[in-house]
Amino acid sequence: MFQAFVIQALVTGGVYALLAVGFSLIFGVARMVNLAHTSFLMLAAYGMFYTTYRLGLDIFTAILISLVATVVIGLVSYKLFIDRIREHEVTVMLITLALATIFQECMVLAFGAHFREAPTLIPGFVELMGVKISYQHLLTIAVVAVVLVAIWLLLTRTKLGIAIRATAQDTEVANLMGINVSRILFIAMGVAAGLAAIAGIVVAPLWVVYPYMWMNPLVMIMAIVVLGGLGSIKGSVIGAFIIGLVEAAVVFYLPGGAFLRGAIALLVMVILLVVRPEGLYGIVFEEERL
């Protein structure tokens, strides 16, 4: 039981980490709250379902198509609807929420509101101390680890990463330094959509695929980003695993925990924010500086 609990906590926390890092990246660079972010997870999951079960493509081709198509949709949506009004926070929130709803209704029209299943990427199980753990769970953990390390290397070891961090620190100064801010924002949006797409691809065989599957993760991701500190990538990762651990513990060890996991996870976030209002790695509020 404990082994299964640890695996579930790592899977849930890892998926949340991929989503939270993308959400934080966009907020940090563009100061934009993208409420359509988790809808890209849903689109990628449907991409896996459609390309495998409907088109009969092999897994690797399905992964490539789902990933590329989701990133393209994210970039086109950003360029057409968000780029020109990104400095208007409320308008951006309304438009991104509308986009998520449009994506959702398109999936309802195309596939219905029924639960779907995507094929397992790696079938089979491994037995660990008497507990069977699917290769799909282990693959998800491995993919999350590799992607998070790759993002860390991108942001800390490359010129692009330096440009992204400079833009996040101060857009005007970055522009004066010769950084193409519009290009950096476009790239950041693509990276964020790609992270959400990867999350959707790896969890599609583990979760049921349906048009409303983006809603609960959106609430949790916003809570994680606030918990970790707005715009903090490190805080988002740590916050994601904290929430994943809490959710798994509630499901495994509390009666009726499957119905309480979201509420208790949010309660933990509230308690931590009462103790540390700026989040784990956020800056203090302006009124606290005076």
Image (cartoon, grey):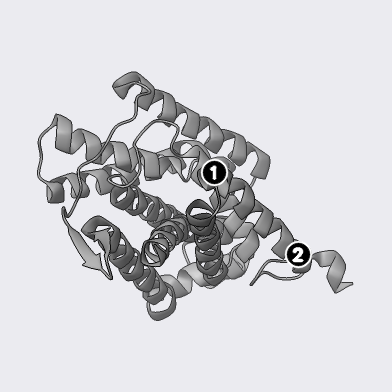
Q: Is residue 115 left or right of residue 249?
A: left
- Badge 1 density bin: few <14, some 14–19, many ≥20, Cα 10 Å: few
Q: Is residue 175 visible?
A: no
Q: Secondary structure at mark 2?
A: loop
- Circles 1, 2 touching at the beta carbon (< 8 Å): no
As shown in the figure, which amino acid type bears the numbered disc 2? Pro
**Residue at 70 percent of width and 64 percent of height:** 272
Front one among 209 and 30: 209
Q: For the N terminus, which image quadrant?
A: bottom left
Where does label 1 land, which residue?
Answer: 256
Q: Is residue 149 left or right of residue 279?
A: left
Q: Secondary structure at mark 1?
A: loop
Where does label 2 land, which residue?
Answer: 277
As shown in the figure, which amino acid type bears the numbered disc 1? Gly
* Residue 15: percent from left, percent from top: 41, 56
Q: Which mark is residue 28?
A: none
Q: How many marks?
A: 2
Is 236 situated above or below 213? below
Q: For the C terminus, which image quadrant?
A: bottom right
* Residue 150: percent from left, percent from top: 34, 71
Kindly indicate the quadrant of the structure image that contains residue 188. Answer: bottom left
> Which mark sits nearer the N-terminus, 1 or 2?
1
Q: Is residue 214 left or right of residue 228?
A: left
* Residue 13: percent from left, percent from top: 46, 61
Kindly indicate the quadrant of the structure image that contains residue 75. Answer: top left
**Residue at 42 percent of width and 55 percent of height:** 192
Front one among 109 and 68: 109
Q: Is residue 115 visible?
A: yes
